[in-house]
Amino acid sequence: MAKRIDAVDLNVYYGSFLAVEGVNIRIEPRAVTAFIGPSGCGKTTFLRTINRMHEVLPGAYAEGQMLLDGENIYGPGVDPVRIRAEVGMVFQRPNPFPTMSIRENVLAGYKLNGTRLSKSDADAIVEKSLRGANLWNEVKDRLDKPGSGLSGGQQQRLCIARTVAVEPSVILMDEPCSALDPISTLAVEDLINELKADYTVVIVTHNMQQAARVADKTAFFNIQGTGKPGKLIEYAETSTIFQNPENEQTLNYVSGRFG
Amino acid sequence: MAEQVTEARSASASPTTKSSGSASADKIFAGLAYGAGGLILLVLAFVAIFLVTESLPALAPKVFSNVDSIKSAENFWVYVMPLIGGTLMASAIAILLATPVAVGIALFISHYAPRKLATPIGYVIDLLAAIPSVVFGAWGMITLSSAMVPIYGWLHDNLGFIPFFAGSPSTTGRTLLTSGVVLAVMILPIITSLCREIFLQTPKLHEEAALALGATQWEMVKMTVFPFARAGIISSIMLGLGRALGETMAVTLVLSGGVFSLSLISSGNQTIPSEIALNFPEAFGMRQSELIAAGLMLFVITLVVNMIARWIVSRHKEFSGAN
């Protein structure tokens, strides 16, 4: 179920502005891969090209190839809607649908792809997904209450439950803990560790300790200056990146000597 | 609302480090806010008192004016009910025609049209709101009504079994349906611009959540934009309805009025504002009271409509996204 991701010479544009240049990376299935780097280095931009969310912004597009188990998702005739259903995404700020209950939030993906679920199937999916997101015990008595009534950390785990409910092959996380307190962060990090048993997990984080804690491999992105494109500088095992990086820029960044 | 005000006041009073200057400025603004809030209630109360006192002779002729009946009918309700019926039917036509179009245009501007197209369309819609109602009335009377005549013939021939399209079609086209269409055009810009503003406020975060789950553009709209905008759409419809209920000039010019009938395509029917406008200049005594009492009924209808709207909006408060 988990799929491998290969980016081949990927350039990402906002209109005429080249935001990320020439990314070549192989992201392994059933592992957690972290993207780190300073603000504006294009790590979020690159992440959003993996499920074609990038092009939601007017004028934004990507060049090159993004292979999902060998299938180029930017190939002709590929429907971005299908790609997004297959590559789930968790956002920086928790965004459960405020007009839906907790249960409806978890089932939102099924509602979209038109699957008709019996009540017992739906119940099973809700319980499995919420258990998978370590949220079941906290919300099982109020599944019909609005998702927006939960705490920030619970909301983020609800968003993860919503993402895993449709069993995607890849889960992208865009700084999933940046709006959360340390305890909620810990809960989400534990969850990320469990998710890699079944999924390809890619996480963007500003928090280097977090990358060190959760990621198997880490990619460091950097930017030479404003107006210049972001580039993938170094990509290796997490321990290598943090303890023995090859590139001087990486060393400066992870040792706190950056900028 | 009162609780929020007291809360805000106690919150602003608590910091002790503030200079006395800002505290007195705070008091002045609080006073102004209270004054403005009170003023609107006062105005409303005066209007209500005026309407009620002036209508009493017509509402209870035996008690207040010592006559057996009002001038135009055996009692006030026999007189006013057909007018209420006409007013509600014309407004309902306007709302039914305008709402889907307005929501569609608003959605097109906010979520579908490229920016180059969206901005001019928005201007045109706003321009529509700036046209005086007498111009709409003249257009409806001269152009639209004659254009509607063949349509009425067709409606009568093919859908005549529905009471709304029964009866002989008007040869001038100056019917309640034509009035409703003119009203629809008039309230279109109100509903459109409000809906557009509300649609644009849908949090990007929620739209992206839907898209990232594999929603198409339309599914995203259904999943995030409409639920988020629900209360706002209802409010904008109510504002449009308020204008349609109270619109005088356009209906007066378009409609060749008459007795109440369910048929929308034959001449007949009258609305309250138009009835008042046509008759008020020559009315005195009891006739004047009748007309003012009819106005009171319009006031009550508008109030009830707004209360129903508020109730609909508050029913789903928990899921509104406001929390």
Image: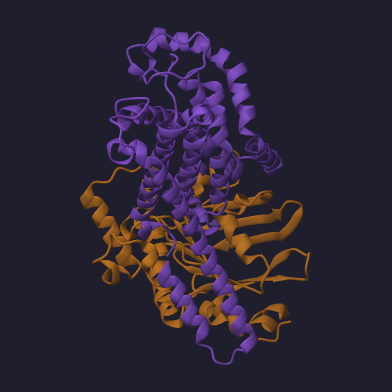
Chain colours: A orange, B purple
The percent coordinates of residue A1 (x first, y second) are: 40, 55
Q: Give the left or right position of residue B155, taking residue A80 as reference.
A: left
- Tell me the residue at 53%/77% (across/down): A211
Q: In which quarter of the image is the C terminus of chain A?
A: bottom right
Q: Give the left or right position of residue B116, taking residue A129 as reference.
A: right
Figure check: A187 above or below B201: below
In this rendered view, identify the residue nearer to me: B146 or B99.
Answer: B146
Asked if residue B176 shows in the view, the reply is: yes
Figure check: B29 above or below B165: below
In this rendered view, identify the residue nearer to me: B122 or A180.
Answer: B122
Asked if residue B219 shows in the view, the reply is: no
- Tell me the residue at 76%/56% (across/down): A17
Image quarter of residue A132: bottom left
- Tell me the residue at 60%/50% (across/down): A56
In this rendered view, identify the residue nearer to me: B92 or A88.
Answer: B92
Q: Give the left or right position of residue A120, taking residue B70 as reference.
A: left
Number of marks in picture: 0
The percent coordinates of residue A84 (x first, y second) are: 49, 50
The percent coordinates of residue A209 (x first, y second) are: 53, 82
Q: Residue furthest front?
A: B66
Figure check: A68 above or below B298: below
- Tell me the residue at 55%/77% (across/down): A238
Image quarter of residue B67: top left
Figure check: B69 above or below A76: above
Q: Which residue lies furthest to the left in this view?
A: A120
In this rendered view, identify the residue nearer to me: A150 or B53.
Answer: B53
Q: Residue furthest bottom?
A: B17
The percent coordinates of residue B163 (x first, y second) are: 33, 17
